[in-house]
């Protein structure tokens, strides 16, 4: 498996674990269940959209790295504006496929742009760090351990997931809920954000424990072994 493929599959596994755990925790809150049921299709589709956008970011960052091997990470030039436009295309394709009488989406990219670009840069820097230390065929976990101390790895993952959570909360401004449930949309969005932040901390800690302590967790997928 190529380095880029390992990075992509690792990100994909984490995002799916993260989304699955979030939905499970939302289902534990009885007042939210009726609201979540018709909305879950959107949440499931949304995470796959984000995985695709992360793939674009990983591939772009890897290409930039390969073309600038002799330069430091600080010198690596990420074309955030162009990359942002590529993610917008993914969003647009997502919205074309999404049809639901329960809600409608009209993306407000001006609200999302700053946070999304920060998230793209955060993920790109992780790609630079890992590729810069990926000198042989060691398993991915060993590459991580030789690149980051455990606390630094948790901070890097946590930053990327936190920015994703913030962007998702901002996305709620682009969603119109039809019918009586529309009156509680903001409450649902805040509860969703709270659960996403809690879940991000748990996922980051679990992924770090798996790598640094070799502690298996039932909801953590194993990639690159």
Image (cartoon, rainbow, N blue to C red):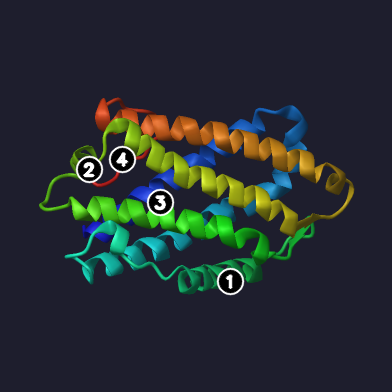
Gap in angstroms between the C-alphas marked 2 and 4 = 19 Å
Gap in angstroms between the C-alphas marked 3 and 4 = 11 Å
Callout 1 environment at 10 Å: few (<14), some (14 to 19), or many (20+)?
few
Q: Nearer the viewer, mark 1 or mark 2?
A: 2
Name the residue beneath numbered marker 1.
93
Gap in angstroms between the C-alphas marked 4 and 1 = 30 Å
Point out residue 168 in the picture as x, y percentages from the top left corner. Answer: 62, 50
Q: Nearer the viewer, mark 3 or mark 2?
A: 2
Quadrant, the C terminus = top left
The kind of secondary structure element at disc 1 is: helix
Point out residue 81 in the picture as x, y percentages from the top left corner. Answer: 50, 71
Q: Is residue 3 left or right of residue 107?
A: left
**Residue under the point 87% across and 45% down:** 183
Name the residue beneath numbered marker 2.
147
Pick whichever of labels 2 and 4 is earlier in the sequence.
2
Give above or below for 86 relative to 75.
below
Pick whichever of labels 4 and 1 is earlier in the sequence.
1
Callout 4 environment at 10 Å: few (<14), some (14 to 19), or many (20+)?
some
Pick whichever of labels 3 and 2 is earlier in the sequence.
3
Q: Which mark is residue 1?
A: none
Gap in angstroms between the C-alphas marked 3 and 1 = 19 Å
Callout 2 environment at 10 Å: few (<14), some (14 to 19), or many (20+)?
some
The kind of secondary structure element at disc 2 is: helix
Gap in angstroms between the C-alphas marked 1 and 2 = 36 Å
The foreground one among 50 and 146 is 146
The kind of secondary structure element at disc 4 is: loop
Pick whichever of labels 1 and 2 is earlier in the sequence.
1
Name the residue beneath numbered marker 4.
222
The kind of secondary structure element at disc 3 is: helix
Pick whichever of labels 3 and 4 is earlier in the sequence.
3
Gap in angstroms between the C-alphas marked 3 and 2 = 20 Å
């Amino acid at each position: 498996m190529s380095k880029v493929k390992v990075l992509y599959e690792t990100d994909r596994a984490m995002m799916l674990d993260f989304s699955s755990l979030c939905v499970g925790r939302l289902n534990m809150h009885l007042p939210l269940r009726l609201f979540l049921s018709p909305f879950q299709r959107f949440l499931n589709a949304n995470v796959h959209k984000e995985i695709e956008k992360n793939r674009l970011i990983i591939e772009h960052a890897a290409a930039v790295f390969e073309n600038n091997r002799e330069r430091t990470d600080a010198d690596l030039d990420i074309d955030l504006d162009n990359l942002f436009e590529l993610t917008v295309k993914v969003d647009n394709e997502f919205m074309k496929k999404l049809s639901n009488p329960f809600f409608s989406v009209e993306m407000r990219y001006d609200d999302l742009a700053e946070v999304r670009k920060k998230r793209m840069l955060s993920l790109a820097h992780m790609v630079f760090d890992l590729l810069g230390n990926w000198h042989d065929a060691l398993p991915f976990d060993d590459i991580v351990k030789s690149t980051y101390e455990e606390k630094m790895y948790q901070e890097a993952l946590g930053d990327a997931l936190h920015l994703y959570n913030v962007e998702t909360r901002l996305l709620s401004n682009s969603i119109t809920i039809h019918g009586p449930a529309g009156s509680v949309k903001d409450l649902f969005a805040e509860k969703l954000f709270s659960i996403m932040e809690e879940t991000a901390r748990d996922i980051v800690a679990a992924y770090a424990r798996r790598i640094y302590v070799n502690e298996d967790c039932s909801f953590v997928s194993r990639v690159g072994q």
